[in-house]
Amino acid sequence: MDMRLFAVLAALTLMIYVPPSQAKPISLVERCYCRSTVNSLPRGYIRELRFIHTPNCPFQVIAKLKTNKEVCLNPEIPWLQQYLKNAIKKMKKSKRSN
């Protein structure tokens, strides 16, 4: 048997019996939700906050506005830093009381 034909048959056999990978492509895995952030946004415009922390991306804060639009906030905004500190204190306090 010709070696090229054998190599092609071996490759086809391997493709048939090897299950496809369930992993996402690298470009989708490493993509961060927030590519740019807003540096100032009044708290009154915000309906809810969502926090995302993934291994490949920095800490991300997504604000859902009252207009249902979502924007990424800079986590270094002073009022947001204070909000996070208060939330952490509240969580520690509730753990101590339980």
Image: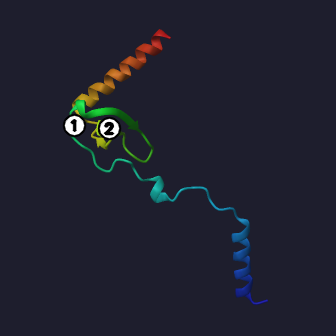
Which percent across, then down, holds residue 83?
A: 30, 26
Q: Residue at x 23, y 30 (%)?
A: 44
Which kind of residue does numbered mark 1 sit on? Answer: Leu
Label 1 to label 2, Cα distance in Å? 10 Å
Where residue 4 sits, quadrant-wise, is bottom right
Q: Is residue 6 left or right of residue 21?
A: right
- Which residue lies under the disc numbered 1? 41
Q: Residue at x 41, y 14 (%)?
A: 93
Which residue is at the far bottom? 2
Colour pattern of the rendering: rainbow
Q: How many discs mark residues in the rendered view?
A: 2
Which kind of residue does numbered mark 2 sit on? Answer: Ala
Characterize the local packing of mark 1: few (<14), some (14-19) or many (20 or more) Cα atoms within 10 angstroms: some
Whether the residues at callouts 1 and 2 have beta carbons within 8 Å, the answer is yes
Residue 8 numbered tag:
none
Give the position of the N terminus as an image quadrant: bottom right
Q: Is residue 98 left or right of residue 75?
A: right
Q: In this view, does 5 lie above or below 80?
A: below
Which percent across, then down, holds residue 29?
A: 48, 53
Which percent across, then down, holds residue 11?
A: 69, 76
- Which residue lies under the disc numbered 2? 63
What secondary structure is marked by label 2? Answer: strand
Q: In this view, does 75 lie to the left or right of 23?
A: left
Q: Residue at x 23, y 34 (%)?
A: 77
Characterize the local packing of mark 2: few (<14), some (14-19) or many (20 or more) Cα atoms within 10 angstroms: many
